[in-house]
Amino acid sequence: MQQYCVSLTEYKRLPTREVKVGNLVIGGNNPIRIQTMTTTDTMDTDATVAQSIRCIEAGAELVRITAPSKNEAENLLHIKNAIRAKGYDTPIIADIHFTPNAAEIAARLIEKVRVNPGNYVDKKKFETIEYTDAEYAEEIEHIRQRFTPLVRICKEHGTAMRIGTNHGSLSDRIMSRYGDTPMGMVESAMEFLRIARGEDYHQIILSMKSSNPQVMVQAYRLLVQQMQTEFGECYPLHLGVTEAGDGEDGRIKSAIGICTLLEDGIGDTIRVSLTEDPEFEIPVCRDIVKRYTGLQATHNPPYGTQALPYNPFAYKRRGTSAIHDIGGHKVPVVVADFSNVNTLDTHSLEHIGYTYNPHSDKWSIGDAAADYVYTGNHIFDFALPGTLQVVCSHATWLAAEDKSKYHPLLTAEAYLNGNLTGDGATFVSVDASMDYGSLLPRVKQDANVVLVAHSTGTSALMAVRRLIAELMLQGINNPVILNVSSSDATVDEQLIHFATEAGGLFLEGMGDGIWLHNNEEDLHNTKVSGRTYLEVKSNEQFLNNTAFSILQATRTRISKTEYISCPSCGRTLFDLQETTAKIRAATNHLKGVKIAIMGCIVNGPGEMADADYGYVGTGPGKITLYRGKDVIRRNMESKFALEQLINLIREDGLWIDKQAI
């Protein structure tokens, strides 16, 4: 069975059990709920109450607070009472990792506890252990004995529970049998869920979080399939990308993971984990949720067969025939949209990664330089950089002298009406929400056509996915560029829109290029640090950066340094925002290097398994540096840590001086 949601061709919510958390109901047909997590010290009651209220007033429907030991768990009652005394009845969640005793205390005091099955009973020492079936069963029985008391307390007190698997904290036992895989994440949660069901306890929400959106999406899909197969029903799902980071990258990465699932009707509550104050997470959550509020089912035609032509649980890029540098084994290309640019000069190209030096008559090309530029009815009157190609209208192409540089864009209707263009690449725009049945046989016979897929329907991702699946079913190997247009009114909304409709398809191996378009006027009133957004960046730079960030987040094209940065919480042992900014400023020129910046040891080593280097708080003012999973410098003074991180990168031959770039 490949299906993991109600429908792959129209928007429908996945039916889930209803779970009551205080006065809030999650799952079923209830709205998608929004939550966040405090960053204050849980023992500082006043600070935690104040921050919780700021989050509630911003729109948080649940507030999670860390409880790493019994003292913090007991103090949750004082925090809860103070919040209630100020007139707020928002449910409180206790975040538990290593301490069953803290969970059992909290479960008697507040509305919900979150446990991590990877470290609630199991341990993680990065050891590989060979288990016989009998030994494995004995470990499961040990988990049952340790976990059942919490289940019974929750059942007695009407307390809800989230079984929250983190990719970065899978236990050595799970890793030994399932590996570092989405299926291992699913089984980690299912072990705990089976125990709870055995106690007839069902007030459970589950999550499958990872800092890699691809792993996260695959794990949730597998979990839905596993619950349906094993139980014939699904429990509510909390969605989130861990350690997403800050700024635009954090928003893009979160939206790709969360919205790819929401598009398929999967997800009952969300959190956007940003390395920013928690109240700033809420507006992003609200922008995401409103995309699906009141969204009606769309009625796209079904796939040609019942079986999907791709595996939704594992990444494999769709096979295509290369046309110039598009498709085949080439990385996805970026098309910069200059259709609203009236004056085309050398300075215009600076916004998309090309800098011209008139003295040497040479171009400098950045790592995030667009591969194509769409000019509409305009032609450049100067020699372009050697790597840059132009897409333009058919009439403009006819007038262009250099047919090796310029390529025509045709509507599907014009293409079918015989506007043939010779031996070069022909870009054909296709609306995936319209009838394209007569177009595909013609395209199949034309090795020069690059399809530019978009949708004017309400569920664009599903429509374009259906089109690409139809190409696969019919054996049509022409490359496809994903063309996404946004008319949203703010930067955050446009980032979410682009990340959802393009990023979700790249996660499934669909797409040989990305082309983003918007209405520049929509961004003029968006404020960033007191200035309008387009005073900070040009619209062309915004679209180009967003396109490359989407490719980076989906791991389909690496063009810059990647940061895996956790949101701060009460466990954080240094100023995470300030430290992240310092590390980013020193290392953001190291293309392809992945650096994890983790506030504490809870998820640090695990989530860093996907990173090249890790910077982890291990005590007040103390930092431990990792190379992959291995400790390299332990418990050093924080004031020396950044210099030592740079030295470590230098030792590995990956350091480049900025002056050399």
Image (cartoon, grey):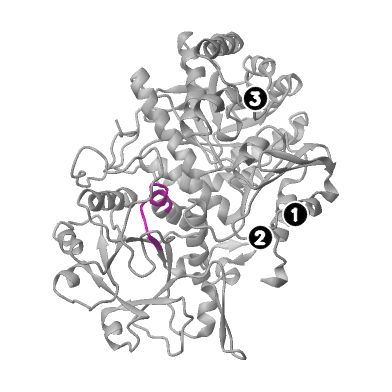
The answer to whether residue 288 of the structure is visible from this angle is yes
Q: Quadrant of residue 502?
A: bottom left
Residue 511 belongs to the span the image colors magenta: yes
Give the mark nearer the N terminus: 1 vs 2.
Answer: 2
Q: Nearer the viewer, mark 3 or mark 2?
A: 2
Give the residue type at disc 3: Ile
Q: Nearer the viewer, mark 1 or mark 3?
A: 1
Residue that mark 3 sits on? 96
Q: Position of residue 520 (x, y in %)?
A: 46, 69
Give the mark nearer the N terminus: 1 vs 3.
Answer: 3
Question: Is residue 259 shown left or right of residue 21?
Answer: left
Q: Which residues are magenta?
A: 503-514
Residue that mark 2 sits on? 588
Q: Position of residue 472 (x, y in %)?
A: 25, 50
| 523 and 601: which is toward the camera | 601
- What's the CA distance linking mark 1 and mark 3? 38 Å
Residue that mark 1 sits on? 651
Q: Residue at x 44, y 79 (%)?
A: 341
Badges 1 and 3: C-beta atoms under 8 Å apart?
Answer: no
What secondary structure is marked by label 2? loop
Q: Residue at x 54, y 66 (%)?
A: 368
| 321 and 210: which is toward the camera | 321
